[in-house]
Structure formats: structure tokens, C-alpha cells
Image (cartoon, grey):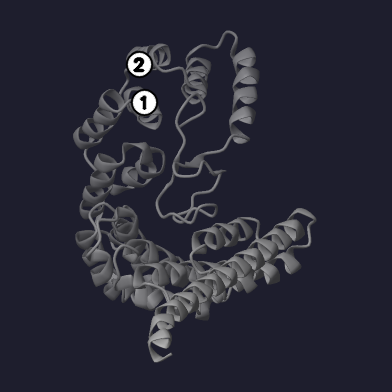
Amino acid sequence: MLELLFLLLPVAAAYGWFMGRNSVKHQELKDRTNITKNLSSGLNFLLTDQEDKAIEQLLHLLDIEAATIDTYLALANLFRRRGDWDKAIRIHEKLHQLKLPKSQARQIQFELAKDYQSAGLYDRAEKLLVPLVRQEPLQEASLKHLIALYISTHEWGKALQLTDAVAATSSNSLRLALANIGCEQLKQEEEDRASQALQSLAEQYPKAIRPRFELAELLLANQQPKQAFALYKSILHDKPQWAADILPLAKRCQVSDEDWYSLLSQLSHKHNNISAHIELAGWLLQHGSDKAAEQLLLDKLQQQPNIRLFRTLLEQRKQSTAQGADALESVTELVANYLDKKVLYSCRNCGFKTRQHYWLCPSCQHWETVEPISGIDGR
């Protein structure tokens, strides 16, 4: 009898293993059935525009299955693009509570910070973004959002504290942002201190326009026209499309005829700038070269059709010929009325159009992207 018991032990063990395995499979099958049921219910709520119920149903699944996080991230991003910040926040907050690998957890933290920022909860967004500015690969993106946050709240000092972190990236847009933020901070400074700080910004961020532009304005106001003219020339060397705004200021710098003619010639012949064509024609008129001025305008019009050049030519002919002056006057007035309604600036990043210049694009929030327009109506 004892021998029979020993023989039955392996059978009992095998039976136990078999029943246990079937029990595990049964539980897994039951869990999967519940997941499918809840997922189906959630999707049904979404399809019937019952989004709040759908979110509750889908978030309940996170306690069971965390492997579908990418699906939840996509859903939260969809809500954020639609402007449903509260729904995106609820999903990302639930994901943020899960124990996940560091890379995935940081990505969710970044997405949640974006939700808070979009919803105007800047203090919460800042708290999540600050630790991420030193973490790759989210460093640059986190810096852009954090600096954008400080721009919205006009906390220029906090933004400038990120100088070292920005220097560790290769982002030119972030450097331009800090250069302009530095200029914003200097608005309340005394003139002498502002001049020194602008000089430092111009040297630290050589690709930025605004520090040089505002420094030149200060120098011109302090009766230092030569230094101001040198700065205006450096801006035009880097950004000849800014001639429409820079040339009237540079003209006040009391430069010699030779230097002024040299600058206008370079901008006109090398860069085909409309404002330079017009200024050069005016310079030729002042020096008694009426025919040369008219020929310059005609040649440039043939090469580069432009309404502003055409108006300048009409005005010149109206002054030089008494016959038909009345007819030319009416045409000139029509052209002037047409140009008065045209936009003067356009953002090269988002296409925003305006008659007023902004250092910070109101549409896409990029610095120094709003520039004078080109083309048939350009300057």
C-alpha cells in the first residue's frame, strides 16, 4: 500500500501543475476579456461624443495594462491640439503616477508640462520643466518651452539664468531669444549701464539684430554718429532685407557722400534691395544726375518689377516734365493709396503679416523673424 502511495505522488503533482496552469490561463483570459470590454466601451463613448465617460473608462485600464502608454499619449495629444486641456491633463497626470522607465517617465513629464503651460498653469509647468533642462534628449525642447513661459510672464531675469544651459545646445533660436530678452530687461536701466549691457549682448550674440539696433539708437542719441553708422552697416551686411528700416536711420549719421554712395551701391547692385534702389536714385538726383537716376529706376524695374519703384519713377517724371503733370499726379495718388493698404512685414517662420514691426512674432512667438516683405509690393 505504501508503494502505491509513492507511485501516486507524481500523478498528484502533475495534476496540480495542470490545474494550476489552467487556472492562470483562465485568469489571463478573464483579464484580457475585461480589457477588451473596457477598451470597447471607452471607444464607444468616444464615438458617441461622451468624452468624459470615455476618459474614465480608458484611464481605468491603466491599472491593468501599462504597455499601451503610446496610445494614451496619442489620445492626450489629440485632446491638447483640440484645446481640451483638462482632458489631456487628466490622462498625462494618470500616466505620470505610473512606475515607468526613466526615459518614458521624462517624456510624460514633458507632455504634462506642455499641458499645464497651454492651460495657463505656469507655476506647475515651470516645476516640471526646470528638472528637464539638463536631461537629454529633452533639453532643447524643454528650454524652448521654459523660456516661452518666462516670456509670457515677463520674468526676464529667470530666463537669463538659463544662459549656460542654452550655450550647451546648438539652437540659434534660443540664442536669439536670450539676446532679445536681455534687451527687454534693459528697458528700465539707466542709459550708461544699458549701453554697456547692449555692447556685451551684441558681442555675445553676434547673429542677433536687436542689440546692435538698440545700441546704435543710443549712440546716435548721444551724438556718436560714426559708431552708430558702423553698427547699422553691420546689420545691413548680415540682413540686407532690413534696408527699408535701417537706411532712414543710417542717413541721420552724417556720413560722407562717398560712404553713403558706397553703401547704397552695394545694397542696390549686389542685393537688389528696393529701398536701396530708391535711395540711390534720390542721391543721383541731388547730385544733378537726373538721367542717371531715371535710367537706374528703369533698369531695376525691368529686372525686378515693383510698385514702389514705379511710384518713385512717376514722381521723378512728374517733377521733371510740366506736360502731363496732372495725369501723372492722379496715377501717383492711385499707386500711393494702393501701397498704403499693403502689409510691410511678414514672419518668415509662420507667414504672419502686419504693417507694424515686432521683435517677437505675435503668432508663432519666434524672435526676429518678422522682416520687411519682398516681391512686387516689397520695400
Locate the N terminus and report the quarter of the image it occupies. bottom left
* Residue 214 visible, this angle: no
Q: Quadrant of residue 239?
A: top left
Q: Quadrant of residue 29?
A: bottom right
- SS class, disc 1: helix
Locate the C terminus and report the quarter of the image it occupies. top left
What residue do we see at 54% from left, 58% from top?
Answer: 71
**Front-most of residues 372 and 288:** 372
Above or below: residue 102 compared with residue 297: below
Above or below: residue 332 compared with residue 77: above
**Residue 25, horizontal then vertical, whole percent:** 54, 68
Above or below: residue 252 compared with residue 9: above
* Residue 185 visible, this angle: yes
Disc 1 target residue: 277
| Mark 2–mark 1 distance (CA, rounded to whole Å) | 8 Å
Report the residue that reaches farthest toward the top.
323
What residue do we see at 35% from left, 68% from top?
Answer: 103
Report the residue that reaches farthest toward the bottom.
2
Q: Is residue 270 left or right of residue 34?
A: left
**Residue 217, horizontal then vertical, whole percent:** 34, 57
Q: Is residue 102 left or right of residue 325?
A: left
- SS class, disc 2: helix
Q: Quadrant of residue 268?
A: top left
Task: Find residue 296 and name its label.
Answer: 2
Q: Residues within 10 Å of mark 1 (few under 14, many from 20)?
A: many
Q: Are marks 2 and 1 in contact (CB under 8 Å)?
A: yes
Which of the two discs, 2 and 1, labels the residue nearer the N terminus? 1
User: Amino acid type of disc 1?
Assistant: His
